Image: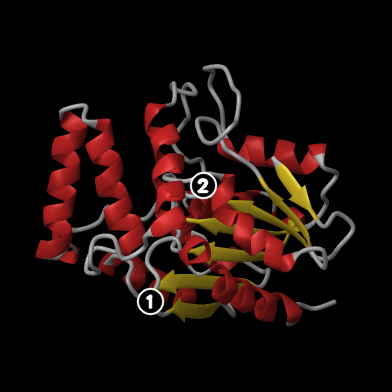
Amino acid sequence: MVRQGAGGAPQVVFLHTGISDKRSWEDVSDLLTPAMDVVAYDRRGFGATTYRAEAHDQLVDLLAVLEALALDRVVLVGNSRGGQIALDFTLTHPERVAALVLVAPAVSGAPAVDDAQIDVVEAAIWDTLAAADAAGALDALNLGEIRLWVDGPHAPEGRVDGPRRQLALEMNRIALHADSPGHEPAPSVEASSRLSELRCPVLVVVGDLDLGHIRERCRWLASQIPGAQLAVMEGAAHLPGFEQPAAFAAVLRTFLEDLPG
C-alpha cells in the first residue's frame, strides 16, 4: 500500500485493473500530491501484496483499507475490475464514498458480452489469448494481454513502448504467476440494475482505443447514472491513467474541483 499527501483533500483511493497493480497509478498520484491525500494498494495476488489462500471478499478488503487508514469518506477511482469493486462498494457503503470515478469498469450483474459486439479484429486477439491460456503459455498470454489492453485492439502492436510497456508486462507477469488467493464469491451486488441509486457525483472515463463493447458500456453507464459525466480520452486504450497520466490527472482534477465543499 502506498499513501502520498496525507492531510491533503480530497482523500482519493485508486483501484487497479486485473493486469496491473498499484504501480499503474504512480504517475497520476505524483501529479495529484501533495494537494490531495492519495492511496493505492495491491489486491490479493497482485504486485507486492502478501496473502494466504482463503475465502475473501474485495469489498471487505477495501473497507479494511479505509478503516486501517482512518479514511471516512473518500473518492474511489477504479479501472476495469477495480471499477467494478469501486461501484459495488459505493452501492454497499454509500456513506463512505464522496465521489466515484469509473474508468472502463466491469459492471456486476451486466449481461455477458454478445458475440455480435466483438468485431473480427478483437475476436482474433481473443482466440490467440484463449489458445495461449489453454496451453499454459503464460509468457505468450502476457504479451497478448498487454497488446489487447494497453495498445488497444485496433492500434498497432507496440504502440505503447519503452519503460511503460516493460512495467505493464512486469505487473501482469506477477498476476499471471501468482498463487491463488483463495475463493472469492460472485459479487453480492448487481450494480447494473441499481445505477439509479447512486447519489454521489460520478465520472465515467474511457479511452477511444478501448474495445468497442467497453466504450459502448461506458456511454450507457453515463446515461443511466443520475448526473454522471462522461470523459473520452483520445489516443488511450483500457488503462488511460497509466498510459496518459498527465491528461488523466487533469480530467480528474477538474472533476474533483467541481465537487460540493
User: As drawn, which residue projects farthest toward the front?
Assistant: 162
Residue 24 sits above or below residue 232 on the image:
above
Horizontal arrangement in the rendering, residue 14 relative to residue 169 (left or right): right
Where in the figure is residue 252, as x and y percent of width and height? 63, 73
Q: How many marks?
A: 2
Q: Label 2 sits on what residue type?
A: Val
Marks 2 and 1: which is nearer the front? 1
**Disc 1 crowd, CA 10 A, few/some/many (<14, 14-19, 20+):** some
The residue that mark 1 highlights is 235
Q: Residue at x 41, y 70 (%)?
A: 218
Front-lying residue, 93 or 132: 132
Secondary structure of residue under mark 1: loop
Pointers 2 and 1 in contact (C-beta within 8 Å) = no
Q: Residue at x 44, y 33 (%)?
A: 174
Q: Label 1 sits on what residue type?
A: Gly
Q: Residue at x 55, y 31 (%)?
A: 44
Residue 247 sits above or below residue 39 on the image:
below
Residue 245 appearing in the image? yes
Secondary structure of residue under mark 2: loop
The residue that mark 2 highlights is 189
